[in-house]
Image (spheres, helix red, strand yellow):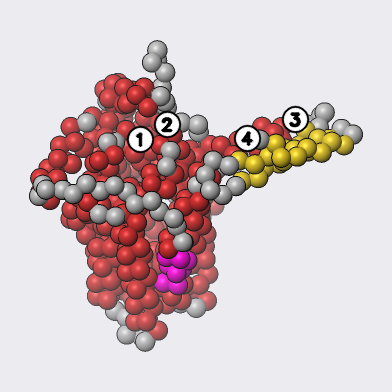
Amino acid sequence: MTNFEVSFPGLKISCFTLKNQPGEWNFFSMHTPGNRHWSKTLKGLKNTFRSLQYRNYRLFFGGQSISLIGTWIQRIAMPWLVYHLTGSVVLLGVVGFAGQIPTFLLASYAGVITDRRNRYHILIATQVLAMLQALTLALLFFLGIIQVWHIIALSILLGLINAFDVPARQSFVIEMVEKKQDLGNAIALNSSMVNGARLLGPSIAGVLIAVTGEGVCFLINGLSYLVVIASLLNMRVTPREIRKKTTRVIEELKEGYHYTFGFAPIKSIILLLALVSLMGMPYNVLMPVFAKEVLHGDSHTFGFLMGATGLGAITGAMYLASRKNVIGLERLIPAAAAVFGLGLIAFSQSRFFWLSMPLMVITGLGMMLTMASSNTVIQTVVDDSKRGRVMSFYAMAFMGTAPFGSLFAGAVAKAVGAPLTLTIGGVAVVLGALLFARQLPRIQEGIFPVYREMGIRPEKQ
């Protein structure tokens, strides 16, 4: 709806307001005889950021954008501190394992709790606990008493928190955007937010570690949680109807398991994610070794490499956000996984910083397209009553298998070196992508009827 229009010789400026939910978004359109792309550009931007029309999602997006920068600063500081204290590749793997194994062990139970309880309240609780974890790390560092066992113990605590946070966060997205057709856009924007932080956080961390030490990184992360907690408390959340369950938790676990692995599209996606996480994602654990030993750099090198991954990832996320719907993402998943695997293989063979940087951009692009596309397809086709449990299996595949990958990477890297370890992981990811591609016809047979029922895909297709 146009609010006003002003015309000048050769130029027309229009202002219109988009008002679908509480909160208004104003856009300007300019038209000139020789340049007609403004309106199309604004329309594209409006489509890309359409989930921000929802007040609750705007609050979530703003709060998390700040908090996640702190999270990535800590993620970079922790392995660097461990490697600085011990010089041990194996202990890098142990710390990675400790931080992620609770998600593997508890995610399915957390999924049941997510379906049974108020997801909004769970999110607030997990953010408060994560803040306390980061501030404890900072306190131990500044007191000069921090040891590796402290880091391992606090990594386990954060893993326990994340076991409940991830399925609750993933399931809560649908409550913030309200309209299911905007779900894919919200997930993609979520990914762009995470990877914008991945882009900024490592670079900031590299400077902070060199100038002030790791303790400031932990402190900044702890304080950043105040922003996201404030944004959550300011939301206007309509309580989700939660039917009182008479069944036991174990019965709901079984129901969620049979639904997840009895539906070919969800099963295939989760198995591919598990492989990618197990064999590909441990590159994060080995990155300090590449920065210091392979590329002969320092914390700045480490930060720039992780930042390059974030640049590729945010590029992929913004591409997904610009898409109008979910159609075709099932074909993108194996292609993106193959790009991720090939990027890892190429990076593992590089011995030059100038070459490693663009290779990490490609790797980050493939990783993000794989993860976010998978998330979008699963969240689109899943039954709402089982969303929390299915997303818990997603969390197990995405985060829960990573600790085993971290241990594998640490042990193998000690025996054969970090480059060959990463090559092995990349080859495994590419093989998994090829296997998934072979299963595409069966996967499409499962998801197309759901798309037609939702009106996403026409009946004749």
Q: Is residue 36 visible?
A: yes
Q: Residue 148: x and y, percent?
A: 28, 75
Name the secondary structure under disc 3.
loop
Q: Which one is in front, 114 or 333?
A: 114
Which contiguous range is marked in magenta? 222-230
Give the CA separation, mark 3 to mark 4.
Answer: 12 Å
User: Which of the two discs, 2 and 1, sits closer to the camera?
Assistant: 1
Give the CA separation, mark 1 to mark 4.
Answer: 24 Å
Q: Are marks 2 and 3 in contact (CB under 8 Å)?
A: no
Name the secondary structure under disc 4.
helix
User: Which of the two discs, 3 and 4, sits closer to the camera?
Assistant: 4
Give the CA separation, mark 2 to mark 4.
Answer: 19 Å
Reply yes or no: does residue 446 show up in magenta: no
Reply yes or no: does residue 225 show up in magenta: yes
Q: Which one is in front, 366 or 19?
A: 19
Task: Inspect the image, locate mark 3, and give the three-letter code of the amino acid beneath it.
Answer: Arg
Give the CA separation, mark 2 to mark 3.
Answer: 29 Å
Q: Badge 3 is on which residue?
A: 36
